Image (spheres, coloured by chain):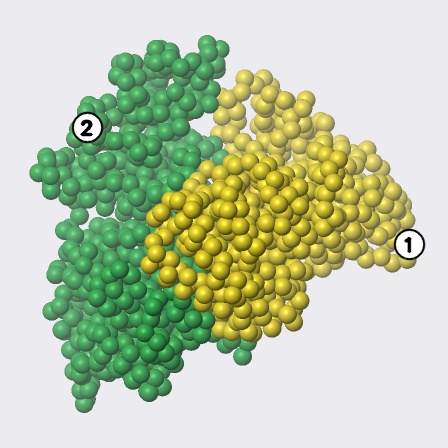
Chain colours: A green, B yellow
């Protein structure tokens, strides 16, 4: 389907917005009147620039507070409308959004609405303008799509149709099923907005918290399916009022928005297919989505590989070799593979720089990433090296796709360079359990959509963790079978003082074992430095859980943390932080499926204390 | 009354929190258990440190999910409670907060609650602990203070009383009047929180958006009056869950919090007095509050006084002289006095650095500022110079108080140094209309309380203005008679790219005239550079208002902006920006009392464009 976006979604000037939309690949844009009004560009210039960029100008919006008014007010409204129709002619635009009256309506009578909209229709016809009538969720008298459709039906003019906006329907909890019964050709325009599940007044929710499809809690694939069923084959557009997007880089936001529409079309096509329904060919499909079956590797960038390598050795990892061509090492234990990369590492003490996931068909995942406008970072190949499609996530993490066979091939690139081969694979760590990535506040929603659309992870319910630097918002994404789990944490805006601003939020790789107590003892014997856990924590554990005193003593001695729920138990510990990263080791007993959330504040406070101490040194 | 604050209000470690509370001057603190749990300090250390700092440890909190449970759950809860009582003994604390059960209660029966709380009372008595029972607004079965009081009455134990929290009562819209009927000695603790008027679920509102008294929309003076009427004379404490405070400088937040309690006591004393009611002497009063009668001056700091002086001359200001001792100039027109200060100005192209307001008794205002913990910045005096009490606002603006007589005295310090005296006072500008100050996001609420408590301005309803950099939150504060008006604007977090981060948000001084058209023509003739207003704006004006075409032409020619409401008309223009400041000239026709809010987006976009152009040069 043709894609469009309202200029109000984006930051910057009107000129910057047009450039960014064209660069991202949108077919057209909606002109939000305010953006034109504050622009030094003349309407003729906007028209010409859009033409040059290959963007259609799809919808002029909003025209407000028109119908249900007194005769004298109607006269003023028609005067105002005529000025806007003339402006639209200069812009070369033919579709105007008419929002149901919120402010000035005083006559609650459908016949009055119909009669007045007919007058608008007559005036619009003189200028070859069509009207798309939209029921706002907080409209004074007209606030449902059923009501706006009833009015449009009775207005019965060729140049008056509907605008359907998912937010105004789903925010009220209304059922979109009746959309399918509206003749598609009477739906003049469609706006698709997602939103987080919040219980607040709809107006504030709408004006500040809308999200691109796939970033919130609305079932937009089902919504779009109803439109397809109606026969609608026009434009799908984004009208997203979001405080963060309005402050973010305009080019990134435009790409994020178009990605959401590509993803949504593909999800909707899948849904219709799985129902055995016919669907419009206009729905753009993406290469087949596939579940990742596990982590391939985690990559740590560091200018000093000895520090990270030492820590891995303490955890029982084996050194598998230097890459035959690059300053890169491979360490493994079980299925956990850690790459230590000292390329492009000047000034980087240590940081989680990327990871790989295994899929059956890496090529298809690569194609999908391309279709979703992800920035490519393919693995550089020399003769006989394994190709892996890769992308840069919004938080700058590099993500690669490989098949189990690919994995065998790239491992060889390390082993064949190493003499003698120290490769053993029987350490106490079994696999990578999850990876925890810090997210700048501007790119959190973009990241959620990136990881769910490009890697096909599902967002789990979010949480918030108190820390000495503020609340840390945390969002887990995982595959259905939990074989790949990511935890995204939004870094607090930071404290005022300069010292505290330098405190970066560390990222980590969590490794799974089946005997954390034995492993911790061995690691301690090898000189591992654990993150210190305060004694008060263990007293609270004793108050909360009826723990065996021997176990409690062991936990305390080894700085292990503990959690328990109905499904099982969770034991874990953290290493000290090196640069901007650390490692976690976890043991999941029975079916425990969480991340020890109650312990996260303990970790954050302890890391803050350590960091403070090192600052004071 | 004794003042206290919960550690959860503040950022940093427990140690940092204690230090900041003591430094601000709180009498005591509430220990939020989580803060202790994540701290490396032992309970004995916390006790000793608090003693050294002169802080009492007033309340251990929270103890959750106790009553209304099954027998086996009760046993576990008593086990948990006993561990906490032992901990409290080590801390030397004797008061625990018991929140009404939110999660685990299954038996909705007051007699069960009473019986189980009596068991807790017996156990607490062994450790000399008292229990303050609080009804949470979202308690499962107990969610009003009337209900919690009914239970406490029937529990009928000396060591069981109430905790009253304003948020849990006012957020539900409950009437606090019945508090006055509770015997004061059965109220063991009082927590005072304000909050902005928001319509969202109470739990989210409570956990993220609470504010210190005076920063939100609750009538806390009336609330505290009910407590005084009950005979309560204990501690008043702050339990404020606020995402921003948790990320802000701990010392500033502590001062902000204590200021709110000092201010609230004084407001409450005034309220009781004005009702002719007796009130407890414990209410701390502040030196008499007085309304400012107008701006005394605005001060612009600049390393190049010629630029700013030139702009003032274009607007018809007269040069009144150099200060006899300092590199400071005075320019006046009517009652508008502008100080151009080039002290401490290296690297400052131009910025609004301070202002003075006139009051009848500057000494009393100075005393009041001191009592409110404002940071002093008294005017430096040499022989025979006028003393003015001054303070630094949270946004770094310097504020001074003077009487009309003081003003005459400090003006002389300029004129006597100037030969020949060019002092004339008949320019077209009549006075300073308002001053617009940028606020860093961390200090917005602090600023609102500062300006309302220290200068006695009243906060008007807030608004939000779209700009190319994001939404700008705007808050006007003014005296009752509008003789002093401030507009505080929160600067958006900013854009990602480095160039855009360098774009600072400019501040401005708005000057009032009675003939803006004449003034604009004269200023243009003198070479004034106006902020450019896009042609599209004037077309929209024509569509919105039935304006005389001659007037419209004049507006467009002179880059004047226009607004109209029921009360009157508003014409205004902006100068170009110098450094980080610009000037506005306004004409208010009839009783127009606003600030041309619909035009603010035009200004912001035009300034953004200008700034972009200058960046590109």
Q: Nearer the viewer, residue B544 or B127?
A: B127
From the top left corner, tell me how far across and down residue B27 is, in percent: 66, 60
Identify the residue shown where x is 42% and y is 46%: B111
From the top left corner, tell me how far across and down residue A398 is, in percent: 29, 63
Q: Residues within 10 Å of mark 2 (few under 14, many from 20)?
A: some
Q: Which residue is mark 1?
A: B384
Protein chain holding label 1: B
Image quarter where the N terminus of chain A lies is top left
Rendered image: mark on residue A180: 2
Identify the residue shown where x is 28% and y is 52%: A459
Q: Residue furthest bottom?
A: A420
From the top left corner, tell me how far across and down residue B555 is, in percent: 60, 26
- Asked if A478 appears above or below A607 in the picture, the reply is above
Viewer-nearest of discs 2 and 1: 2
Q: Residue furthest left?
A: A276
Rendered image: mark on residue B17: none
Is residue B125 rendered to the left or right of residue B281? left
Is residue B331 rendered to the left or right of residue A11? right
From the top left corner, tell me how far across and down residue A366 is, in percent: 19, 57
Protein chain holding label 2: A
Q: Nearer the viewer, residue A375 or A308?
A: A308
Image quarter where the C terminus of chain A lies is bottom right
Identify the residue shown where x is 18% and y is 90%: A420
Which secondary structure, mark 1? loop
Q: Are marks 2 and 1 on the same chain?
A: no
Q: Nearer the viewer, residue A455 or B67?
A: B67
Identify the residue shown where x is 64% and y is 70%: B51
């Amino acid at each position: 389907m043709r894609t469009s976006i309202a200029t109000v979604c984006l930051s910057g000037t009107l000129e910057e917005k047009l450039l960014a939309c064209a660069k991202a690949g949108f077919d057209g844009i909606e002109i939000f009147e305010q953006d034109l009004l504050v622009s030094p560009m003349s309407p003729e210039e906007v028209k010409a620039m859009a033409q040059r960029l290959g963007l259609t100008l799809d919808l002029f919006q909003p025209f407000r507070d028109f119908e249900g008014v007194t005769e004298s007010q109607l006269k003023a409204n028609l005067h105002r409308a005529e000025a806007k129709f003339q402006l639209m002619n200069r812009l070369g635009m033919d579709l105007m959004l008419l929002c149901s009256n919120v402010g000035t309506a005083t006559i609650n009578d459908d016949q009055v609405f119909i009669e007045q909209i007919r007058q608008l229709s007559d005036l619009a016809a003189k200028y070859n303008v069509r009207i798309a009538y939209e029921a706002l969720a907080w409209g004074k008298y007209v606030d449902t799509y059923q009501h706006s459709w009833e009015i449009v039906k009775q207005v019965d003019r060729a140049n008056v149709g509907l605008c359907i906006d998912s937010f105004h329907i789903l925010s009220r909890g209304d059922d979109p099923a009746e959309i399918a019964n509206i003749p598609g050709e009477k739906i003049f325009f469609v706006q698709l907005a997602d939103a987080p599940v919040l219980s607040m007044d709809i107006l504030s929710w709408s004006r500040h918290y809308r999200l691109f499809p796939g970033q919130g809690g609305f079932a937009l694939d089902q919504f779009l399916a109803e439109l397809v069923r109606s026969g609608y084959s026009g434009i799908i557009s984004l009208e997203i009022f979001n405080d963060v997007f309005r402050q973010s880089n305009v080019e990134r936001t435009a790409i994020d928005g178009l990605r959401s529409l590509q993803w949504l079309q593909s999800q909707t096509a899948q849904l219709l297919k799985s129902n055995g329904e016919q669907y419009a060919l206009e729905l753009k499909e993406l290469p087949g989505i596939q579940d990742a079956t596990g982590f391939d590797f985690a990559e740590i960038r560091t200018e000093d590989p000895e520090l990270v390598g030492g820590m891995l050795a303490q955890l029982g990892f084996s050194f598998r070799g230097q890459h035959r061509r690059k300053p890169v090492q491979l360490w493994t234990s079980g299925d956990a593979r850690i790459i230590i990369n000292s390329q492009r590492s000047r000034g980087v003490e240590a940081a989680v720089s990327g990871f790989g996931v295994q899929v059956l068909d890496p090529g298809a995942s690569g194609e999908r990433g391309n279709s979703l406008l992800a920035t490519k970072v393919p693995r550089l190949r020399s003769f006989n090296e394994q190709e892996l499609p890769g992308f840069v996530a919004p938080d700058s993490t590099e993500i690669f796709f490989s098949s189990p066979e690919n994995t065998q091939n790239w491992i060889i690139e390390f082993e064949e360079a190493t003499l003698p081969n120290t490769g053993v694979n029987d350490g106490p760590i079994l696999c990578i359990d999850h990876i925890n990535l810090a997210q700048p506040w501007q790119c959190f929603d973009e990241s959620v959509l990136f990881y769910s659309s490009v890697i096909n992870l599902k967002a789990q319910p979010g949480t918030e963790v108190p820390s000495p630097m503020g609340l840390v918002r945390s969002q887990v994404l995982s595959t259905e079978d939990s074989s790949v789990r990511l935890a995204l944490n939004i870094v607090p805006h930071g404290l005022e003082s300069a010292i505290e601003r330098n405190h970066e939020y560390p990222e980590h790789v969590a490794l799974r074992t089946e005997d954390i107590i034995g492993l911790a003892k061995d690691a301690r014997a090898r000189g591992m430095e654990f993150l210190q856990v305060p004694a008060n924590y263990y007293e609270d554990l004793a108050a909360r859980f009826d723990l065996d005193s021997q176990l409690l003593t062991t936990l305390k001695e080894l700085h292990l943390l503990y959690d328990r729920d109905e499904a099982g138990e969770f034991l874990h510990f953290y290493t000290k932080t090196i640069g901007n990263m650390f490692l976690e080791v976890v043991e999941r007993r029975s079916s425990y499926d969480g991340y020890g959330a109650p312990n996260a504040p303990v970790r954050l406070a302890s890391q803050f204390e350590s960091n403070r101490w090192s600052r004071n040194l």
